[in-house]
Image (cartoon, rainbow, N blue to C red):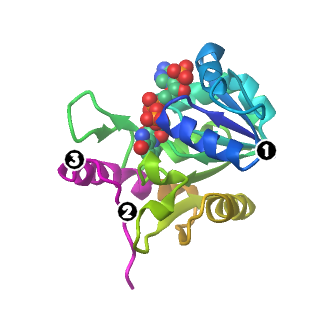
Amino acid sequence: MKIAVLGTGDVGANIAAKLVTLGHEVKMGSRTPEKANAWVKTQSKSASGGTFADAAAFGEVIFNCTLGSASVEALKEAGAENLGGKVLIDVSNPLDFSKGMPPSLTVSNTDSLGEQIQRAFPSVKVVKALNMVGHDLHVNPGLLKGEHDLFICGDDDAAKAKTTEILTRWFGWKSVIDLGGISASRGMEMYLPLWVTIAMRNNFTPFNIKVVK
Ligand SMILES: NC(=O)c1ccc[n+]([C@@H]2O[C@H](COP(=O)([O-])OP(=O)(O)OC[C@H]3O[C@@H](n4cnc5c(N)ncnc54)[C@H](OP(=O)(O)O)[C@@H]3O)[C@@H](O)[C@H]2O)c1
């Protein structure tokens, strides 16, 4: 499958590398193709790089792994015409580190970045996923021995089914909990200040949460 990964940070590089090892054609997008191409040099021939627009045009499914405070801008650079109608798995968090740790959020409570992205690109099938766990767990949930859950949300059921298939069959997640429409991004993103506090107090050792009924 042709997949676009928008973002050259730890999250994008990690997800993109896993997709390549699974045999997919992956194009990483960046503001400047040179940055994405630096990653490409470490990969096999099924990896390529380009601008955000190049990658979005290429991908049948798109991962948004860009800085949350710049994600809407990055997706505008990717181009509505290249994103339209596709599943966009949104891993970003609207973190604001300008006032120190733990971070605050650039949007919260009655709105969220997931919703901002969905509103900016109405024909895109946005699914929020993977934003509540550290990048080391994204494609390696088995790093934690116990049972733990991953949450997703989005307005399009078929897009959530596709995302769940990617998360479970490709990445190895055993429990994916659907929280409903994209407005559930509010809670998923507002968890982040708590996530960072837990991570800081545990020296950023990988961890996750489990819903016990
Ligand atoms: N780190 C984690 O463990 C983790 C876990 C879950 C979710 N997340 C979320 O995943 C996202 C990616 O995190 P990350 O740590 O891998 O990288 P990051 O440093 O948050 O983001 C890097 C990407 O954002 C792009 N970017 C930065 N400023 C931009 C701007 N002004 N306009 C357009 N694009 C811009 C960069 O473009 P260039 O390539 O051109 O530099 C780069 O591709 C974030 O939203 C983060 O909150 C992170």
Q: Which residues are magenta?
A: 186-213
Residue 31 falls in image quadrant: top right
First in sequence: mark 2 vs mark 3: 3
Q: Which residue is mark 1?
A: 85
Q: Per the image, is 194 magenta?
A: yes
| Residue at 40% from the left image edge and 58% from the top image edge | 187
- Do residues under tags 2 and 3 come within 8 Å of each other at their CB atoms? no
| 178 w.r.t. 27: above or below | below
Residue lying at 71% horizontally and 57% vertically, measured from the top left: 159
Question: Spatial distance from mark 2 to mark 1, Cα to Cα?
Answer: 32 Å
Amino acid type, mark 3: Met
Ligand 1 is within 8 Å of the C-beta of the residue at disc 1: no
Q: Which mark is residue 200?
A: 3
109 to 173, vertically: above or below:
above
- Residue 201 sits inside the magenta stretch: yes
Dot 2, how many residues are within 10 Å of its Cα: few (below 14), some (14-19), or many (20+)? Answer: some
* Position in image of residue 134 (x %, y %): 41, 49
**Residue 179 percent coordinates (x, y):** 52, 67
Amino acid of disc 1: Gly
User: What is the distance, in whole Å, between disc 1 and disc 3 at their CAs?
Assistant: 39 Å
Marks 1 and 3, the one that precedes in the sequence: 1
Give the SS element for disc 1: loop
Can you tell which quarter of the image residue 96 is in? top left
Residue underneath mark 2: 208
As shown in the figure, which amino acid type bears the numbered disc 2?
Answer: Asn
For image coordinates 52% across by 56% down, the residue present is 140
| Residue 4 in sight here | yes
